[in-house]
Image: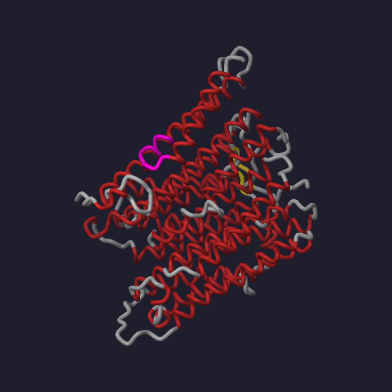
Amino acid sequence: MTGTPGGSLLVLAIALPLGATLIAFVLGGQAAARLARASLWLWLALTVAITAMVIRQGEPIIYVLGGFAPPLGIALSADGLAAAMLLAGAIVLVATAQFGRVAYAAPSWEMGGRAAFAYWCLLPALAASLAVAFLARDLFSLFVALEMLTFTALALACLDGRPSQFKAELRYLLFALLGSVLYLLGCALIYGAYGTLDIGLLTGNTRADAPTRLAGALMTAGLLAKMAVFPLHLWLPPAHAGAPPAGSALLSGLVVKGAFVLLVRLWFWVLPGPPVAGAELLATLGAAAILVGSVVALRQEKLKALIAYSTVAQIGYLFLMFPLLMAGDPDAATRAWMGGMLQAVSHALAKAAMFLAAGLIVQSIGEDRVAGLCGAARAAPLAVLAIAIGGLSLMGVPPSGGFTAKWMLLRASVDTGQWWWSLVILAGGLLTGGYVYRLVAAALAPAPPDATPRPVPRLQEVSVLVLALLSMALGLLPLSMLGLAQIGQPVIAP
Amino acid sequence: MNGTAPFALAAAGLVGLGLYGMLAQSSVLRKVIAFNLLGIGVFLVFGIAARRGAAAGLPADPVPQAMVITGLVVAFAATALALVLTLRLHQTTGAVTLAEDPPTANSAAPSE
């Protein structure tokens, strides 16, 4: 196997943010902040270039590190899935960096500069981990990427250093560590059976025997723990809701998607003719997550806890695509595939916007209960608008990205005769409408007469609103852009 | 029963012990130790894969050994991170477990 043109872009996509992290760590202070922001803008440009190149070539970009072909060396590759997720990650990270210009602008170490220093070092580190998670083509590099994601996400979640936070984050860390050790054990079994961990070499060469099945089960269980799929979701709401706004946005929007991409690669590239019963189990867990997560979100009293439970529910949608892909209907499989990818991207944008907006609202009116949100629409109008638009995308109201995603999953479930999933999608949409309505109605209520909201920095409001608008604009993308998801789409034997 | 069987049994034992410890122990420190046991068990599985996959005349396949070294570094970093968090948890709240209502919460939190 040899590389394709444009392969060096993939190396840059990993090396640029990683280098920026190291240099920012040495520089510190305002220079680190400027460097981190510049590197993230450059990274966004790089991901746009990678996406454009994948679309133009119509096939995945491959780069073989050092010219050593697998199984001796390791390879990087960007297919449609990787390019789309990278682009979404870059957009969310740039918006979060703009948001952080105000929140983490501490001029000196004494005035909270410690959190600012960590923030600006960790943002590019998260970018590098995401790049490895999306571009790596062997299971062991993906393990390292998973761990990098966990460590940076954990540190971002603990930025405030509030005592109440440590317990939630420690529980998150232990769950994540258990998940990654199970994943690593699966890697060991696969290496023992096939002598390679390269995804390209494993595709089509794995046998449906006991060690492979066991490895698949272990790795799937580990990744489910990392993605907080029902019933392993209990760690997520406190960990995501308790983090500072920028941390919550990155954790909910991007970090869980890293594990999702790994799961998809494992199931549709590595495992031999993935078991249909297993896929139905995954979708059942997803359906339970949608219903339970949404109902619990409806009952939450705290703003950020509500949004965190909504993440549990929205992750559930990602799992509905598994049995639809294996039904043996190529058209329906393509629809399910694009629906799953769009759901991952649109949720990343919408949820990041909602968490950042929630942070702005809490900061402005000093109140984090849903019942106490009255007057928020006057105090932080653009933030409330961003929550409403993000909510529309989560509900699946046209023309949002969430609508296209859910509509494609819905059609695929009807086309393959698995109509019961469509009931779950519709019920989930209704419940989502319920909790978004609760938020928006509370925020639009008149403010108490003695309210003295603090003004919200315009830069933060605008960056949040842009994220929300982008999640909406996803639904207006031309079909040729949606075709991106199909580049490198695996052929799944029923 | 060949040369790798004792190691395989040891690996299975370590993985089982570690898994049990991570799920059943309430103290965070014990959970972290259990995580390390579990990790060592997994590295041993890699070692067995290296021994069995060795070409004729070679003592072992070097690739899994390289993976184990990387894995050790990752596990070390994870352990350090978990211990720092545990320490901060204990310093600020006096708690040593993740239970919602820790029995030690009543004792005054030591000042920093």
| A118 displayed left or right of A51 | left
Which residue, as the protein is rendered here, is positioned at the far left? B111
Q: Residue B42 versus residue A31: which sits nearer the camera?
A: B42
Q: Is residue B76 above or below residue A299?
A: above
Q: Position of residue B46 (x, y in %)?
A: 54, 27
Residue beneath the point at 39% across and 35% down: B33
Residue beneath the point at 30% across and 51% down: A28
Q: Quadrant of the N terminus of chain A?
A: top right
Residue beneath the point at 46% across and 68% down: A300
Chief secondary structure of the magenta portion: helix
Q: Is residue A224 visible?
A: yes
Residue beneath the point at 64% across and 74% down: A398
Q: Is residue B33 magenta?
A: yes
Q: Is residue B13 above or below residue A462?
A: above
| A73 displayed left or right of B73 | right
Q: Position of residue A473 (x, y in %)?
A: 59, 71
Find residue A304 and report its image quarter: bottom left
Give the total of numbered labels. Answer: 0
Find residue A458 and report its image quarter: bottom left
Write the start and end of the magenta stretch as one range.
Answer: B25-34
Q: Is residue B38 magenta?
A: no
Q: How is the image coloured?
A: secondary structure
Q: Is residue A9 visible?
A: no
Find residue A371 and report its image quarter: bottom left
Q: Position of residue A73 (x, y in %)?
A: 58, 32
Q: Position of residue A165 (x, y in %)?
A: 35, 55
Which residue, as the protein is rendered here, is positioned at the far top? B57
